[in-house]
Amino acid sequence: MSTHIRFSKKFVKGFKKLNRKTQKRFYDRLKIFEENPYHPTLRNHQLAGEYSQFRSINITGDIRAIYHVVRQEEKVQVIQFDLIGSHSELYE
């Protein structure tokens, strides 16, 4: 199955606010995600409550990237990263 990844405007805006080291870390994690979205390093997990349609992966100890599956067909999966930021920024 091939995966197509896209980014929301809010994600891009949040990403630009991150320092370069954290941005690089995101790209490193994205490579891992593309190979195996459930790799233990990512700590990929389903969210609850108002975010129950979303999943989260760890970028650093405190930075998270939130995404959802837009569409999943037989051979293609479309993923959209919606938000990125610290745990407290995203969940409070």
Image: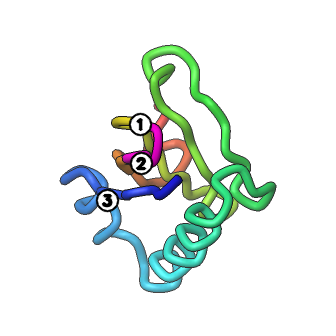
Residue 20 placement: quadrant: bottom left
- Identify the residue under disc 1: 73
Separation of disc 1 and disc 2 at Cα?
5 Å
Image: magenta residue range: 72-79
- Identify the residue under disc 2: 76
Q: Is residue 73 left or right of residue 42?
A: left
Separation of disc 3 and disc 1 at Cα?
29 Å
Residue 71 or residue 9, whichever sits in front: 71
**Image position, residue 31 (x, y; %):** 57, 73
Q: Is residue 64 left or right of residue 75?
A: right
Q: Is residue 44 above or below residue 52?
A: below
For badge 1, the amino acid type reads: Glu
Which tag is nearer the camera, tag 3 or tag 2?
2
Q: Secondary structure at mark 2?
A: strand
Q: Secondary structure at mark 1?
A: loop
In the image, is residue 35 part of the stretch drawn in magenta?
Answer: no
